[in-house]
Image (spheres, rainbow, N blue to C red):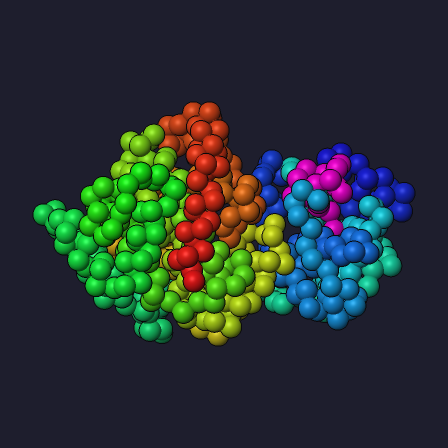
């Protein structure tokens, strides 16, 4: 029987009936739900929370997100999510990320969302990465005996019967329904200059020096320990010619100028502070990966730097929903970003077009802004595992960079990636991971300082 040992002993001891559903081995609960072929609304999941008094398990529908304020109203406790490492230690008989929502089997107090009690049948993780459990309502109530019930979630089940839209339809509706921000004038001028093969470092420097804030940020970048330039740098032109090179200056300036199109708060896991940190780290890694797989180094940097702009567009167009998404991200660290976006934006009211995910939305914006095709593609499908197609190298570079950054707690995704296929797709050997990790360790303090200066 493919159940976690403590769960199996508990169900047997209590005489609780269930059906085991074998599935192919998967890497996350999201993947297990997809592999089952059953509706998301049939699943329940566990979110583990902790405070000074100990751990509590919150049980809620898979297609809902936990509201920590609602948990406080029910329990009177200011609980916070456990880290993945803490959860893995507590559930040592389970595969990582596959926590069964049966706290009694692990002698944990349980709170359960009221929506769970309305289900006729439920499916949930067995504690392993290759099977699920199905129970009828009565059996699941027995499994949750003693749990406190109440309203715990921000969003309830979405409309799973909603017809999906093509990206062309999404792009068309976005432009018709919402006023998409144009590329800022300075960013547009920089983009046009980079398209001119005869453009000079002097012309780029003059364009940047037109904006004092951008000038200061480029100079700070050039003087950082990232490059260890031994001499003095007194102008943007010197930064271009002596330290950074034309392409790198153009790309960082383009990124800084483009961000000004969006009004997004600084705070939170999805705020501007975290955005810049994620973007700079991803750009650095993509720049390092590119020559190892025969891709253009400068274009790789730009793909990494701009791949998450869709998140800024969502925050700019829908500040209230973005705040909700930010809260969901912090409360549900093991959920995929795409599943959280479906919860927030898959509810109708004309916003369901955004449930395709911030990646696709960013690709649409980049296409509208006429950015290079690899940048459009890397943004548009970086949330899509197993991508094969046009500009594949650049997409896989961004995905690999993001996978490595998750281990440092950087980015908006924390569910594990399948790294070996990414390496294989790029034609890289496994030992490149150690090399890239060492490179990141070396420059991390400087990237952190630069990110802080850019978001301020």
Q: Residue at 68% of width from left, 64% of height from top?
A: 68
Give 231 or 157, whichever is nearer the viewer. Answer: 231
Q: Residue at 44%, 40% (x, y): give it.
A: 443
Quadrant containing the C terminus is bottom left
Q: Main secondary structure of the magenta part?
A: loop
The answer to whether residue 408 is left or right of residue 170 is right
Q: Can you tell which quarter of the image residue 331 is in?
A: bottom right
Whether residue 82 is visible to the viewer of this picture, yes or no, is: yes
Q: Does residue 32 appear left or right of residue 441 in this picture?
A: right
Residue 122: x %, y % from top left: 71, 54
Residue 381 visible in image = no
The answer to whether residue 47 is left or right of residue 333 is right
- Hey, which quadrant is residue 298 in on the image? top left
Please tell me which residue is depicted at 9% across the width and 47% down the height of the picture. Answer: 198
Q: How many discs mark residues in the rendered view? A: 0
Q: In this view, does 338 lie above or below 171?
A: above
Q: Which residue lies furthest to the left in this view?
A: 198
- Look at the image and tell me in which quarter the N terminus lies: top right
The magenta stretch is 87-101
Residue at the far front: name it. Answer: 232
Q: In this view, does 160 lie above or below 287?
A: below
Residue at x-position 30% and y-position 53%: 218
Q: In this view, does 411 lie to the left or right of 92?
A: left
Percent across and percent down for residue 74 are: 77, 69
Residues 107 and 385: in front is 107
Q: Residue 255: x and y, percent? A: 32, 55
């Amino acid at each position: 029987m493919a159940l976690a040992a403590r769960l199996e002993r508990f169900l047997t001891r209590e005489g609780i009936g269930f059906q085991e559903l074998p599935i192919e081995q998967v890497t996350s609960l999201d993947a297990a739900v997809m592999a089952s072929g059953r509706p998301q609304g049939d699943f329940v999941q566990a979110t583990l929370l902790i405070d000074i008094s100990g751990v509590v398990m919150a049980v809620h529908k898979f297609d809902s997100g936990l509201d920590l304020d609602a948990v406080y109203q029910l329990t009177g406790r200011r609980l916070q999510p456990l880290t993945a490492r803490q959860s893995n230690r507590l559930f040592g008989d389970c595969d990582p990320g596959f926590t069964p929502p049966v706290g009694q089997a692990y002698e944990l107090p349980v709170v359960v969302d009221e929506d769970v009690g309305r289900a006729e049948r439920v499916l949930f993780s067995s504690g392993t990465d290759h099977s699920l459990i199905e129970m009828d309502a009565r059996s699941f109530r027995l499994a949750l005996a003693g749990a406190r019930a109440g309203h715990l979630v921000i969003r309830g089940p979405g409309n799973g019967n909603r017809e999906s839209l093509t990206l062309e339809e999404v792009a068309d509706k976005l432009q018709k329904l919402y006023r998409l921000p144009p590329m800022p004038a300075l960013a547009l001028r920089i983009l046009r200059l980079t398209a001119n093969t005869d453009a000079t470092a002097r012309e780029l420097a003059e364009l940047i020096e037109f904006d004092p804030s951008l000038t200061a940020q480029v100079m700070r970048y050039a003087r950082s320990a990232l490059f260890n330039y031994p001499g003095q740098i007194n102008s943007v032109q010197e930064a271009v010619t002596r330290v950074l090179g034309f392409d790198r200056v153009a790309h960082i300036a383009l990124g800084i100028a483009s961000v000004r199109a969006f009004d997004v708060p600084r705070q939170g896991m999805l705020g501007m502070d975290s955005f810049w940190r994620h973007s700079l780290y991803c750009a650095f890694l993509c720049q390092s990966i590119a020559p190892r797989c025969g891709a253009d180094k400068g274009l790789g940097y730009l793909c990494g730097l701009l791949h998450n702009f869709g998140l800024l567009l969502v925050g700019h167009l829908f500040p209230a929903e973005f705040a909700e998404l930010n809260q969901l991200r912090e409360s549900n660290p093991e959920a995929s970003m795409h599943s959280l976006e479906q919860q927030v934006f898959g509810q109708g009211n004309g916003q369901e077009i955004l449930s395709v995910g911030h990646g696709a939305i960013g690709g649409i914006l980049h296409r509208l802004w006429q950015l290079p095709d690899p940048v459009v593609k890397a943004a548009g499908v970086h949330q899509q595992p197993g991508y094969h197609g046009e500009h594949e190298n650049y997409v896989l570079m961004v995905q690999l960079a993001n996978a490595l950054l998750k281990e440092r707690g950087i980015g908006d995704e924390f569910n594990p990636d399948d790294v070996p296929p990414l390496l294989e797709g790029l034609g890289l050997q496994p030992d490149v991971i150690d090399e890239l990790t060492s490179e990141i360790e070396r420059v991390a303090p400087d990237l952190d300082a630069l990110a802080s200066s850019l978001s301020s």
